[in-house]
Amino acid sequence: MNLKSFKNLSFAIFFLYFFLVSIKLLEKGIKTLGAEYTDALFESVSNPFAGLLVGILCTVLVQSSSVTTATIVGLVGSGVLSLEYAIPMVMGANIGTTVTNTLVSFGHVRREQEFKRAFAASTMHDFFNLLVVIILFPLDLYTGFITKMAENGTDFIIATGFTATKPNSPIKAGIKWGSNNLLDGISSIPFIGNLSENSYRVYAVLLIIIAIAFIFLSLRNVVSNMKSLMLNQIEFGLDKALARGGGLFAILIGILITFSVQSSSITTSILVPIVGSGILSIENAFPITLGANIGTTITAVLASFAVDDPAGLTIALHHVFFNLIGVIIVYPVKAVRNFPVNLAKRLSVITAKRRYIAILYVLVTFLLLPLLGVVIFN
Amino acid sequence: MSKESLDNIDAKLSEMLTNSMHIFDTAMNCLLGDTNLDSVRDDLYSTDKAINELHREVRREMIVHSAVNSRNLDIPLLLSYMTMSKDIERIGDYCKNLFEIAETGNTFVKGDDLDSYIELRNDIGKLIVYLQSCLALDDESKVQDLITLGSSISSDLDNRITNLLENKDEIQFPVASTLFFRYLKRIVSHIINASTALIMPTDQIDYLDE
């Protein structure tokens, strides 16, 4: 390992720890705010459809489903957000994250054919996630089967005695130590220190904002350092995926790349220019995208290590199972597999001819409809 | 920048040159030796296809590399790879053209100039090998030597073509010889162009004489 790689790895580990500490800080901030306020705050997502749309909006705004899901894990883990409310929000985060690679596809807007391919490569992820939400959201809402799977998974992991899930585990102790010191540091700033004594609610809100900002900052640094560290492996993996075409191998490549960089947007955004140039077909890029959808769930699982309540792990596992089941439903049957791909292709034909429709699509799908929906469902 | 993937591209360019050397030798042996054309035809065309496939692989690797390293991309280097791979790919095409001269029944085996043609073959063969070593060594002075040597061979070929056009040389197959020299000159030019990509500013690549 050379010095640069060592530096990247050290920073990635540090920021991963800082990420977990920030989740804990968020938990502390929420607890400081008090149940009466947090209950009122999350009343707006008591309608599952509103929760779904809030998940989309939040992810579009922060451009990272990992930040949204990690924050939700923190909220669930601190006991202020129920699983019932959190599940649709995580599903929404899945949809919202696809906006990033759609924006990346606009980089190819000058050349019609290239834009057509690039836009299809990005929107197939949108259509896949929408399709899976359309199938699994009502199904889980009424039967709760994914929730039950996640709860059983949580019980199983706790029963195995996995260190990170134990209340007095060294990992949790380390995170607690870090968050206590961070909290002391923040509170030692005179202005904030005064707030903690005189106006604890403003202080709590400030802590929550700082924690979310730290989650965003730390994840961003984990992603950038891991990406620098894994550049060769990413290229190697993509070269192999190109050589082999699609299939399960491509799903595995998608999982591994996303798992290693902790961001599905990185994986799917890398695919956009590759498909745009025409060297990878949309059909063969699709399984890599599906793999990215699975790989991205690891961040929520990591975040669950920072919280005390096992419900944090349950929501993280729900995210894992939801994305896994989505791939199992869509991928094996060719007709189903081709459905989101063909929808994306059809939309790309239209947008390549009238490119303003692509902008309208992004604004309507990721901003206007969710905003309108939140207003209607509340 | 990810070094390993660039090393991969270097390795592919080197493999293209190895194949180019093979196809060049094969084509020249058909014109300057008593090689049975039927026995080498398939090998020659499949080698050219292998060069073309390597060319496409280089392009694919560059796209993947650009997509993965979008934030700190060495664009001049990638542009030089692009032009270099194209030049190397063209060597194979001209070797095919040389083989086609032989296929039309022309051979220089019994001509008076056979020895000088063999010398030409050896010199151009050396240029290909030299380019391969320049690619591996990243040594500007070696590239300059290659350009100097290539330019002198190119001038020699130009003179031969001019002499033929002006009917100064009595020769057995004038048309075939003109094409022969012309194709060899194109091969040498592509070798020089590929080498300029190693050392010259991006906008100056291919324009050595301007």
Image: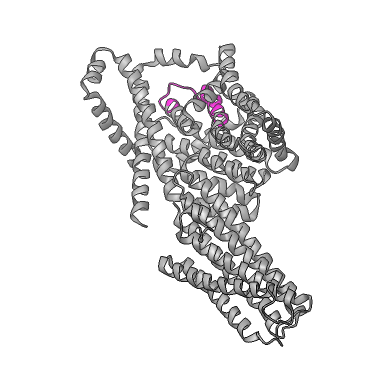
Picture coordinates of residue A156, whole percent (x, y): 50, 40
Picture coordinates of residue A120, whole percent (x, y): 65, 37
Residue lying furthest right: B104
**Residues shaded magenta:** A75-95
Q: Is residue A291 visible?
A: no
Position of B202 with respect to A202 (left or right) is right
Frontmost residue, B105 versus A208: B105
Q: Indicate whether B60 appears above or below A13.
A: below
Frontmost residue, A247 versus B192: B192
Q: In the image, is residue A7 part of the stretch drawn in magenta?
A: no
Picture coordinates of residue B194, whole percent (x, y): 54, 63
Frontmost residue, B45 versus A267: B45
Question: On the rendered image, what quadrant is the N terminus of chain A found in?
Answer: bottom left
Q: Quadrant of residue A319?
A: top right
Q: Is residue B123 visible?
A: yes
How is the protein colored in the picture?
A: one colour
The residue shown at (49%, 55%) is B204
Q: Main secondary structure of the magenta part?
A: helix
Position of B89 with respect to A216 (left or right) is right
The residue shown at (59%, 62%) is B87
Position of A171 with respect to A109 (left or right) is left
Q: Indicate whether B11 appears above or below A188.
A: below
Q: Indicate whether A365 appears above or below B203.
A: above
Picture coordinates of residue A354, whole percent (x, y): 68, 28
Q: Quadrant of residue B92?
A: bottom right
Frontmost residue, B87 versus B170: B170
Total marks shown come to 0
Question: On the rendered image, what quadrant is the C terminus of chain A found in?
Answer: top right
Q: In the image, is residue A76 part of the stretch drawn in magenta?
A: yes
